[in-house]
Image: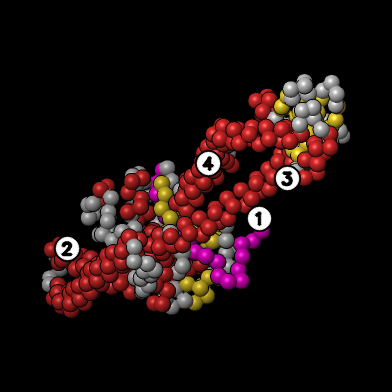
């Protein structure tokens, strides 16, 4: 069952170090902003007001004294013209409002309302306020809040973009190390990991390069030793076979020739494996009808064997090395026929998703799932095939993998329940395409 989109996105982001670093930065920025605004708001609403209250009270006492008792309208009007104030006077002798068109000019806090009121000795109540209170209140609530919100959002976006770019630059060596590890794992040591910085990640890249160089020297030494041994063994092996041919016919002579033949085949496989390790450069390609090649190979090498051929007639010609494809087919069919368990071995070709698939399947016991990934390793054989009569030395599937990779394809092994299915997947040549379904 496919998980929901938000879970897939969450999993993808959870596996991305850059996204997590940016997420941590965002959480830190938002948390810092929230704590800062909450703290400053609390300080302004309590501490600042208590600090400003005596100053405001003393200033309003002076303004009330200047208006006089009983209040003088002219003095009050002069104050309104000189200062950004609103004054309202209510009393037995004078009813006057400097801004009669405004309904409410004072703050909503009762404590501040009482602070802005003064009573004269003759019973008049003088209320002070801002002359443009409503305009200031509207600006305070709308324009200023809107500006602060947009500026805060823009600042967070700028900081987020900067954090992402910095995280991307900071983690660039991780991407280089990842790409280099993939190259080294595929056996490509031609390009080292660039060391962009001298920090811990730069040191890690240098250590990985040193490890890759050591592995390359070790592999080259092993290959050189293997080639040298193989070449040196060919001459004495040829002489031994000639001498064995001169012996009188006997069971011992046949056993000796059989063992010498197996040694000859082993050396030939080792040398062929080293040649195929060079990749596509060693191939001799020619336009090949794969179906015709399979029919010819079966008729030549496996006449009368129990094989079931299902070949797709729509296969286009492929640029193949015929000798290497014949080697692959012989190895796959030999292995399948050894484990056929009395049922016919299936040999199929098909076009699947823009690839040509050649599949050989037996109906034997199959292979343990834990051993599938190791079947293509050199000299590896499952425990069930350790005996000399049941299996070879473990180079057949190794050579098949090399043939597949040198042609730009891959070898896919799976348990077919029952049996084992081995598929060669080759890309279509340029200009070819699978037929419409």
Residue in the picture at 41% in, 46% down: 415
Identify the mark at residue 36; answer none if there is no mark.
Answer: 4
Seen in the picture, residue 364 relative to 98 is either above or below; the reply is below
- Residue 305 as seen in the image, left or right of residue 109: left
Q: Which residue has dot 3 on it?
A: 143
Q: Which residue has dot 1 on it?
A: 437
**Earlier-in-chain disc, 2 versus 1:** 2
- Residue 297 as seen in the image, left or right of residue 44: left
**Earlier-in-chain disc, 1 versus 4:** 4
Q: In the structure shown, which secondary structural element does the residue marked by tag 3 occupy? A: helix
Which residues fall within the magenta stretch?
A: 418-437
Q: Are marks 2 and 4 in contact (CB under 8 Å)?
A: no
Give the distance between the C-alpha atoms of the residues marked 1 and 4, in whole angstroms: 64 Å
Instruction: Give the camera-side residue of 282 and 234.
Output: 282
Residue 257 % position (x, y): 19, 68
Does the magenta-highlighted stretch encompass residue 435?
yes
Q: Nearer the viewer, mark 3 or mark 2?
A: 3
The quadrant in which residue 376 appears is bottom left
Q: In the structure shown, which secondary structural element does the residue marked by tag 1 occupy? A: loop
**Earlier-in-chain disc, 2 versus 4:** 4
Identify the mark at residue 255; answer none if there is no mark.
Answer: 2
Residue 157 % position (x, y): 59, 52
The quadrant in which residue 119 appears is top right
Residue 359 % position (x, y): 46, 56
Instruction: Judge the density around disc 4: few (<14), some (14-19), many (≥20) Cα neighbours within 10 Å.
Output: few
Q: Nearer the viewer, mark 2 or mark 4?
A: 4
Instruction: Judge the density around disc 1: few (<14), some (14-19), many (≥20) Cα neighbours within 10 Å.
Output: few
């Amino acid at each position: 069952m496919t998980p929901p989109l938000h879970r897939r996105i969450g999993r993808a982001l959870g596996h991305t170090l850059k996204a997590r670093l940016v997420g941590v930065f965002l959480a830190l920025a938002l948390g810092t902003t929230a704590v800062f605004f909450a703290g400053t708001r609390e300080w302004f609403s309590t501490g600042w007001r208590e600090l400003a209250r005596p100053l405001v009270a003393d200033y309003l006492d002076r303004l009330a004294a200047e208006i006089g008792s009983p209040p003088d309208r002219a003095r009050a009007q002069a104050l309104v013209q000189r200062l950004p104030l609103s004054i309202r006077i209510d009393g037995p002798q004078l009813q006057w409002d400097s801004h009669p068109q405004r309904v409410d000019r004072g703050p909503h806090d009762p404590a501040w309302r009482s602070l802005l009121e003064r009573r004269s000795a003759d019973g008049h109540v003088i209320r002070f306020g801002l002359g443009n209170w409503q305009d200031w209140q509207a600006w305070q609530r709308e324009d200023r809040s809107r500006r602060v919100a947009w500026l805060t959002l823009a600042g967070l976006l700028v900081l987020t973009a900067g954090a992402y770019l910095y995280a991307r630059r900071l983690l660039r060596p991780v991407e280089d190390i990842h790409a280099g590890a993939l190259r080294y794992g595929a056996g490509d040591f031609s390009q080292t990991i660039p060391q962009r910085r001298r920090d811990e990640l730069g040191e890690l890249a240098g250590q990985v390069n040193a490890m890759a160089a050591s592995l390359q020297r070790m592999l080259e030494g092993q290959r050189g030793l293997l080639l040298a041994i193989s070449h040196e063994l060919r001459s004495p092996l040829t002489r031994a076979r000639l001498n064995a041919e001169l012996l009188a016919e006997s069971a011992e002579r046949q056993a000796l020739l059989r063992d010498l033949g197996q040694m000859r085949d082993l050396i030939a496989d080792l040398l062929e494996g080293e040649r195929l390790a060079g990749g596509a450069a060693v191939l001799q390609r020619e336009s090949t009808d794969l179906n015709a090649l399979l029919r010819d190979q079966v008729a030549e090498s496996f006449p009368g064997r129990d094989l079931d051929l299902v070949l797709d007639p729509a296969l286009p010609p492929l640029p193949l090395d015929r000798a290497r494809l014949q080697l692959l087919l012989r190895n796959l069919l030999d292995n399948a026929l050894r484990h056929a368990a009395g049922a016919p071995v299936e040999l199929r070709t098909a076009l699947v998703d823009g690839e040509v698939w050649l599949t050989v399947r037996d109906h034997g016991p199959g292979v343990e799932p834990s051993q599938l990934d190791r079947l293509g390793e050199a000299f590896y054989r499952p425990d069930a095939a350790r005996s000399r009569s049941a299996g070879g030395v473990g180079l057949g599937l190794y050579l098949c993998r090399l043939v597949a990779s040198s042609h730009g394809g891959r070898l896919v092994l799976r348990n077919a329940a029952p049996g084992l299915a081995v598929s060669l997947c080759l890309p279509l040549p340029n200009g070819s395409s699978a037929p419409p379904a």
